[in-house]
Image (cartoon, grey):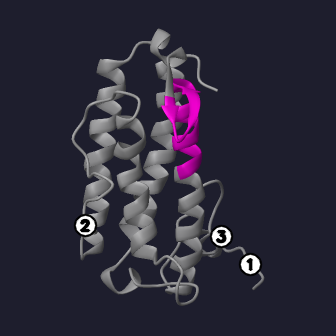
C-alpha cells in the first residue's frame, strides 16, 4: 500500500514504462490475435488497459485528459501505443498536481466498495500488470518479439548467449 505520492509514482513509473514497452512492440496484424473465438483480442486488451486509467481514476476525483472507457479502439497499433503514452503522462501530472499524501486516505465508492485512494492506485497498478501478462501471451501467439519485464525474455537470454529450453 502507498503512504506517499512519491512512493506510488516510483512504482508506477517502472510499471507504466514496462507497459509502454510492451505496447510499442505491437503491430497492426497482431491486434486481432485471440486465444480462441469469443475471447478478448490483443488489441482489445491493450485498449482496455489504456482506457482503464481514466475510468478508474476519474472515479476518485482526478481530472486529466485521456481516452475514456467508451472511446473507440484505434485501428493501428501505433495509435494505441500513443494513447497510452498520452494517458500516462496526463495521469502522472494529475497525481502530482492534484493530490497530496493526505489524499491517499480519502475514500470513494469503487464498484460498490469503499476504497481509499491508496487502494485504488494499488489496484490500478495490479490491473496493468494483470493485463500486460495477458498481452504478452497473445504477443507470443502472434509471433512478436518479447521484452523482459521482471527478467530477461527468451530473446534477451539468447542475445546473451544463453540457450533457453523450449
In the rendered image, residue 112 lying in the magenta stretch gets the answer: yes
Q: Mark 1 points at which residue?
A: 164
Instruction: Provide residue 155's location: percent of width, then percent of height.
Output: 59, 75
- Asked if 31 appears above or below 112 in the picture, the reply is below
In front: mark 2 or mark 3? 2
In front: mark 1 or mark 2? 2
Q: Which residue lies furthest to the top in this view?
A: 102
Q: Mark 3 points at which residue?
A: 157
Q: In which quarter of the image is residue 134?
A: bottom right
* Element assignment for label 1: loop
Instruction: Provide residue 64's location: percent of width, then percent of height.
Output: 25, 35
Instruction: Provide residue 108's location: percent of width, then percent of height.
Output: 49, 26
Mark closer to the chain start, 3 or 1: 3
Q: Residue at x 53, y 34 (%)?
A: 120
* Element assignment for label 3: helix
The answer to whether 152 appears left or right of 24 in the picture is right
In the rendered image, residue 110 lying in the magenta stretch gets the answer: yes
- Callouts 3 and 1 close, C-beta under 8 Å: yes
Q: Which residue lies furthest to the front in this view?
A: 112
Q: Residue at x 21, y 41 (%)?
A: 65
* Element assignment for label 2: loop
Instruction: Provide residue 158's location: percent of width, then percent of height.
Output: 64, 76
Q: In which quarter of the image is residue 31?
A: bottom left
Q: Which of 53 and 160 is in front in this view?
A: 53
On residue 67, the disc is none
Q: Which residue is drawn at 49% across and 53% down?
A: 18
Q: Name the residue under label 2.
A: 72
Q: How far apart are marks 3 and 1 (CA)?
A: 7 Å
- Callouts 1 and 2 close, C-beta under 8 Å: no
Mark closer to the chain start, 1 or 2: 2
Residue extent of the magenta highlight: 109-127
Amino acid at each position: 500500500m502507498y503512504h506517499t505520492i512519491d512512493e506510488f509514482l516510483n512504482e508506477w513509473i517502472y510499471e507504466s514504462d514496462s507497459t509502454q514497452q510492451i505496447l510499442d512492440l505491437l503491430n497492426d496484424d497482431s491486434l486481432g490475435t485471440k486465444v480462441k473465438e469469443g475471447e478478448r483480442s490483443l488489441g482489445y486488451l491493450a485498449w482496455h488497459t489504456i482506457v482503464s486509467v481514466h475510468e478508474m481514476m476519474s472515479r476518485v476525483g482526478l481530472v486529466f485528459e485521456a481516452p475514456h472507457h467508451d472511446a473507440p479502439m484505434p485501428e493501428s497499433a501505433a495509435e494505441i501505443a500513443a494513447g497510452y503514452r498520452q494517458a500516462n503522462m496526463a495521469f502522472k501530472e494529475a497525481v502530482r498536481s492534484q493530490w497530496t499524501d493526505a489524499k491517499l486516505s480519502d475514500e470513494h465508492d469503487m464498484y460498490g466498495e469503499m476504497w481509499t485512494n491508496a487502494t485504488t492506485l494499488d489496484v490500478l497498478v495490479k490491473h496493468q500488470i494483470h493485463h500486460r501478462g495477458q498481452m504478452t501471451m497473445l504477443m507470443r501467439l502472434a509471433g512478436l518479439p518479447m521484452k523482459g519485464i521482471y527478467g530477461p525474455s527468451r530473446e534477451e537470454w539468447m542475445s546473451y548467449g544463453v540457450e533457453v529450453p523450449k
